[in-house]
Amino acid sequence: MKFTTKISFLFAFSFFLFFGKNEILAQEKSKIKKLKNTEAVIKYIQKKQKNWHKKYYFTQKNIYPDSTGNISEKSKTELILEFIQSPNTLAVYPQKQNPNDKPKPPIKLHNDTLYMYDFELNVKQKVYYNMPLVWLSGGLGSYEVKTIFEKLKKIDINPEKFYQNDKVLVIGADNADDQTSSQVHYDVQKGFLTRVFIPNYKGWHEAIFENQEKFGKGWLETKVTIYKDKKIMLSEIYQNPQTPQNEAENKDFDKKVNVKN
């Protein structure tokens, strides 16, 4: 009798999990179908990203294509010692080539301005540098919708156009057949960035975000492949993601991303 009761309980529990999950997915799809304009899409993504980590750092490995234009064992690799990022700021600390070398000065990006430093960490040069991948990947919550519209227009993405399907929310195109307009894609269920396509952008034309992993309450891509003229420029591999764990680490993080340091 007890065995039969246990089996019945397990069946009921499994039934509840299966149909409960399907019910949640059905409710989510219903919400998505009600998104009638780009403003609603942006607010939906902002809500998805609301509780994501706002500060994190990781090591980055750049892998360049070989002589055939592909990524292989013969590809050149470059390791960046530390890559620090918050919603609209990043700081890159290059690896020393030799143990006795003086540490290379960092490069920092803050609100579309690139800061370059000398070895004494004095600002050597400031230049305008519109690098949309930083704020598109996890920084939508840092801006008002109006500001996001303005930033999208600066990178040739029409914020009035959007479409959706079971996999992605797309801003900048109004149907899946449009493969020429500048556009940005987000995962429809989890809200993370999957693709940025800007055919007239200087330096690169397309970025594919892959291999997303759960990171705290959010998600973090572990691979980004950059293309120009449909050819691979490089693949970036992100490893050992971490967040500040205490007040001292928070202060150290803020110091490293602060453009005045």
Image (spheres, rainbow, N blue to C red):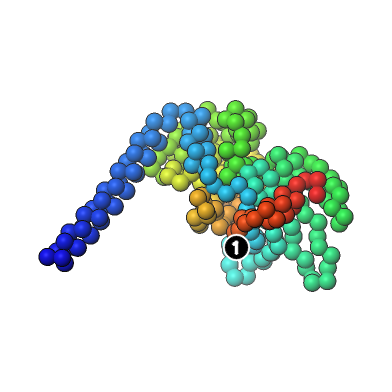
Where's residue 24, x and y in %? 34, 43
Per the image, the residue denoted by label 1 is 240
Crowd around label 1: few <14 · some 14–19 · many ≥20 (10 Å): few
Residue 174, position as x, y percentages in the image:
47, 32
Instruction: Please report the residue visible at 21 percent of the width from the left and 54 percent of the height from the top.
Output: 12
Number of dots carrying numbers: 1
Please indicate, yes or no, whether residue 160 appears anywhere in the rendered image: yes
Q: For residue 177, which quarter of the picture? A: top left
Relative height, residue 60 to residue 73 (above, below)? above
Which residue: 80% across, 60% down? 104
- Say which amino acid is labelled 1: Asn
Residue 129, image x, y percentages: 73, 41
Q: Position of residue 251 (x, y in %)?
A: 72, 52
The quadrant of the image that shows the N terminus is bottom left
Closer to the camera, 261 or 227? Answer: 261
Horizontal arrangement in the rendering, residue 20 relative to residue 178 (left or right): left
Direction from residue 9 to residue 164 in the image, left or right: right
Query: What residue is at 83 percent from the left and 68 percent from the top?
Result: 101
Farthest left residue in view: 1
The residue that appears at 30% across and 43% down in the rendered structure is 23
